[in-house]
Amino acid sequence: MRLTRTSDLWWKNAVVYCLDVETYQDSDGDGTGDFAGLTQRIDHLVRLGVTCVWLMPFYPTRERDDGYDITDFYAVDPRLGTLGDFTEFVRTARDRGIRVIADLVVNHTSDHHPWFQDARSSRTSKYRDWYVWCDSPPEDGPEGVVFPDVEKSVWEHDETTGQYYLHRFYKQQPDLNVANPAVRDEIARIMGFWTQLGLSGFRVDAVPFLLETDGQEDADQLPDPHEYLADLRAFLGRRSGDAVLLGEVNLPYPDTAKFFGDSESSRGDELTMCFDFIGMQRMYLSMARGEAAPLAAALRERPAAPRDAHWATFVRNHDELTLDKLDDDERAEVFAAFGPDKDMQLYDRGLRRRLPPMVDGDRRRVELAYSLLFSLPGTPVLFYGEEIGMGENLAAEGRQAVRTPMQWTPDKSGGFTAGEGVELPNPVATGAFGPTKVNAHDQAHDPASPLGRMRTLIERYRETPELAWGDYRVIDTDDPGVLVHLSSLEGGAVLVLHNFSERSVTASVEVPGLRGGRLLTDVFTGDTLKSAAAGLVDVALDPYGYRWLRVNTPLDDPDRATAV
Ligand code: NOJ
């Protein structure tokens, strides 16, 4: 493996960890998490093996959309600390080998942002053209509100100026007009500002909406969206060579893949990474059915990322666990298996639950999902609390159910705050997944705990370069419950098996290039097994079991493992 490439493309085998400063650790007892508290918790992240923290929005906000409605792009919300606290955190993280990226939310602002306040004051105001206005909503304009429980249209009438403004999300989140060069310049300035303060890139919010120009009156004068995204990436590269753009693009595979950019050169010049929403959704369908086929099909369909780009994989993110890319029957299956009550579902498309309660606390099924996360090709992204097996609190509103305070200790507030009787951003989880049962402190020294196991998975993932850097192929087996893939890199290879079924199975796997009588070593236990005949190996798996097997001698023809 070429060393220069491995260290430059650090994000290819990163472990990304998403957290909200507000719900992570309160340092001053006022009930709100803050940067000082987060900084105190850095050792937890180091010991877990995190290499990149993704901060959810920490900017001043009206809190209509949990921080995704920003009133100032160049500041820290005073509830969370100061710019000084932010910088101390970034510096401490860097010192411990952790890079920091943050949400870049520039599809829209808060309606209380001074730009919008000015824009709506008159049709001739300075910032009027920073937003998207029309006299009457176009019949065939942008369709599909994102929050259908509250919004019925993406256009809102503005009383003062008598026009309508575009808002993809809540009406309190007017869309910025990227067709305006001044807006594009400002977006670059925002990126420049935070990279100057030490960020290593951004998780780009709502990318397709940011670039969307359909339905706008002057659509023909708008910049080509992909050219614009490539410009942003180039700008970022000039400012900070190792910085990344991790994009939120939830579209069918071929459409998402376009956001990697220039496939001609096979380098990728737009988003560095795109979340694999399709793979995530099919994983849940596989888990609901106890069958590997849905996920195997997704992996086969998934376009290869360009050489200098990567997919980003996840078990759940901070929003509802969206199932919008499954068909109605498939979604109904997943709802029935993992969130049958209406109250567990959101917007008819997703679940406001975390994984452990979905599987009734079955550790085997939880581990199966995380073994997939760390062994399937793509950069794994964790959401805080997953490492200790946190659950949701359905008493919290909407998506907030999965954004409850991090559980550090068995205390009432989970050690999140020392404040008594203070208001928390969201209620702490209760019951079987509350802090008395699930907390980082109790698990810290137990290798068999969820936290101990997660650390082991992360260690093995980091020690197994084939997974992040290699080519992979999905291999057929004779058992419908078992997913097998082979990741190969320069002659080294790892054979990975996952059993989605509740049966003990022995899968017969044909491994291309494997000679008879060769040893395979279990990466977790060190146990070995031998290939029976040329190219053939039988692997026993427990119910919901998984194995990562290192092929001890190079495969005859590693190139054969390049096609999926
Ligand atoms: C996507 C974010 O993940 C979500 O939380 C937010 O509501 C929307 N973008 C709008 O910013």
Image: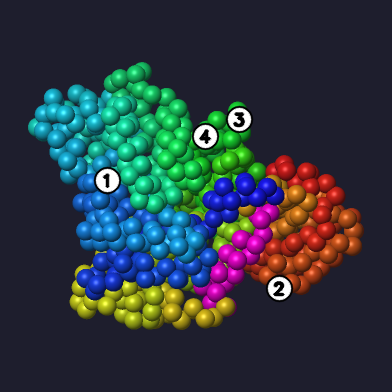
Q: Dividing the picture into quarters, in which one does residue 368 lie?
A: bottom right
**Judging from the image, what secondary structure is the residue with disc 4 in?**
loop
327 and 262: which is toward the camera: 262
State the residue position of label 3. Answer: 265
Residue 44 shows in this picture: yes
* Viewer-side label of 2, 4: 4
> What residue does disc 1 label?
73
Which segment is the magenta one? 448-467
Residue 537 picture location, percent across and down: 82, 60
| Alpha carbons under labels 1 and 2: distance apart | 49 Å
Question: What amino acid does circle 1 point to?
Answer: Phe
Q: Residue at x 46, y 81 (%)?
A: 442
Disc marking residue 525: 2
Q: Which residue is mark 4?
A: 269
Pick the residue in front: 385 or 83: 83
Tell me the tag on residue 185: none
